[in-house]
Image (tube, rainbow, N blue to C red):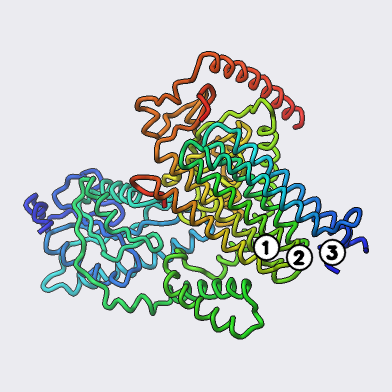
Amino acid sequence: MDALETARVALVVGFTLLGLFFTFVSMTGVLRLPDVYSRAHTASQADTLGAGFGLAAVALTIGWEAAGVKSVLLLFFIFVTNPTAAHAIARAAFEEGTVPWTEGDERR
Amino acid sequence: MWWVADTDAGSDPTGGEAGDSGDPESDSPSAPTGGLVVPVEPTPTLRAMVAYAVEAAADNGFSTIHLVEIASWRSGDPDADDRASAAERVLERAEAWANSDLDDFDGERPSVTIATKLIGADEYLFGPDDYVQVLAAYAEEHGADTVLLDPEYTPVGNTTLLQPLEFALSNTSLSVETAPVTRPTRRERLRSEATGKRFVAMFGFSLAFYLVLGDPFYWFDWVTGIATAAIVSITLSRVSIDAEPAIPRTPMRVFRGLIYVPILLFEIVKANVEVARVILDPRLPIEPTMNRMRVIVGSGLPLMTLANSITLTPGTLTVRARDSDLYVHSLIPASRDGLFDGSLERWTRFVYYGRSSARLPTPRERDDCAILQGPDATEELPIAAADGGTSSADGGGSSAAADSAVASGDEKRADRGKREAAEVADE
Amino acid sequence: MSVVDATLVAGYTVGDFLLLAAAGFTVLAIGMLYRAVKGPTMQDRVLAVNVLGTNTVVILAILSAALSEPTFLDIALVYALLNFLMAIAISKFTVERGGVL
């Protein structure tokens, strides 16, 4: 195995672990945070770096093929649509009159 | 007739103080010989509009016809000069038409003055209310009391503004009339160059997307791809693309967008690490607040880019966009400060308007931001439940919980003080 | 030889590691499921399901790489699309008046 291959394998492993870490942080946040708005913040972590590193690892594994291009496209698509979805959800909560949690409120 | 009420107020075609075209009767808004304000756009019905306006003015003794073009851009945008001169050309042409109509009038030439003006270029206009505000200010300044609308008047992209405009105008003291002109044939728009460009852009984009997903070296994918791209661009080219693709501008925007991507990624990573540290902290030192920020980007795609970038960055979340006011929820004070420093706003302006337009004061310096919640709140939260009866969840919980919250709050503040000191030391 | 078959440690390949990572993502997804079941408001549930969906997309992509099945990526793409539509549609319809988009 040449040096380039070793570096590629190391990057794949590193990116996957980073993706797992940020998805873990996001899960912790979704479980711990007190209201829907703050949960939406940490949900965007899973969307950005969790999915970002995971899909980067996939693209690196597959390499320069049609499928690799497709995984980059997938990443781009997630980056465009997920904030829009998060915004729609937060806006729905806002229109229903959910007051954002502040210090001293009960968690819900 | 809609102008009869004005006629008996004493409109005298010969005695009208015609005034110079720049500023007629500005100090007498209630002058009997009112003006007629005609918002102008290069519509297919513009010629008929001008003819109708001249006829109406001559019949009913309006002393001045104000042909105004409302700018949908903001001066300082890189292409603002080009668009302003294009607008000036439209105004000149309309003025020439009006003058020749006046000369051709049966009998002697009515004493109607034509004034042209480009208005509203000093700020971005969002929606009909902003347009009406600009229009009403102009009308008051020049003592005009009637607005004549073109049924084809669509200043912002594809949005039909006529009905919202009529509604918003009904709240002012101006009287409104829609000119009874119709476009020659409906088919003209489909044949026009404008839609052609959009069609081509949409077609190319969807075909490229299809071939990336499929196999670009297989003839069957080309056949199905062309068919689907044609369907997509026929149905959606006028919906999806609201600005005309232009040759130097659109590729430049794409290029600058490519520069923006790594910068946005860097911001995202930075914010992610910050937020991850807060979430994994056992004390959970969050301080969520709702904030309002007035941004200086155009409506449509630029605003969407900015709002999406803000949401994509962990720690800030766009909850509502009301015209140019963004309601942003922030998780920790650090991300709120980053938001008020406006670096994403500057980058969005860089992508859409170029480097020279990216230099502008931060929202904090412009005083365009406000915190809506918590101890530093400066404005009310625009939400029904907030000023009405508080729900049980907002009551504050048990006193013990409140005490611990206060205690942890103090601790947090001390913590933040330390962090700020560290930041100062870094600089 | 592709990267998937490269040996990582003690005879295990990168493909095996990716399968393990997919299992890890699945465990995290089950954690999110708690919020989707409990979440006091409808928006909490939608948000949790949305994050779950993104997670599923990543899992599908990783499986596609680990098992050398490129068609899984197409399924992931369609899943991402449906996930987006789901979030938009539900947030639109949970608001009684006005609408979201």
Q: Is residue B59 above or below residue A38?
A: below
Front position in the image: B390 or B55: B390
Residue B280: image x %, image y %?
A: 69, 33
Q: Quadrant of the N terminus of chain B?
A: bottom left
| In the image, residue B386 above or below residue C96 | above
- The amino acid marked with disc number 1 is Ser
Q: Quadrant of residue B351 in the image?
A: bottom right
* CB atoms of marks 1 and 2 within 8 Å: yes
Q: Name the element at disc 1.
A: helix
Residue A2 as seen in the image, left or right of residue B213: right
Q: Which mark is residue A71?
A: 1
Picture disc at residue C5: 3
Q: Chain of mark 2?
A: A
Query: For residue B178, which quarter of the picture?
Result: bottom left
Callout 1 crowding tier (Cα within 10 Å): few <14, some 14–19, many ≥20: many
- How much space separates mark 1 and mark 2, taking CA atoms? 9 Å
Q: Which residue, given by chain and number where applicable, does mark 2 sit on?
A: A62
Q: Quadrant of the C terminus of chain B?
A: top right
In this rendering, would B96 be left or right of C66? left
Identify the secondary structure beneath mark 3.
helix
**Is residue B393 in sight in this rendering?**
yes
Q: Residues within 10 Å of mark 3 (few under 14, many from 20)?
A: few
Which residue is rendered at x = 54% and y = 55% of the image?
Answer: C83
**Callout 1: chain:** A
> At which x and y percent is residue C76?
62, 61
The verdict on a common chain for dots 1 and 2 is yes
- Apparent side of residue A9 relative to residue B137 in the rendered image (left or right): right
Residue B213 in the image: above or below residue B178: below
Furthest toward the bottom, the residue is: B219
Q: Residue furthest right?
A: A2
Discs 2 and 3 lie in a common subunit: no
The picture places residue B72, in percent across and down from the top left corner, at: 41, 57
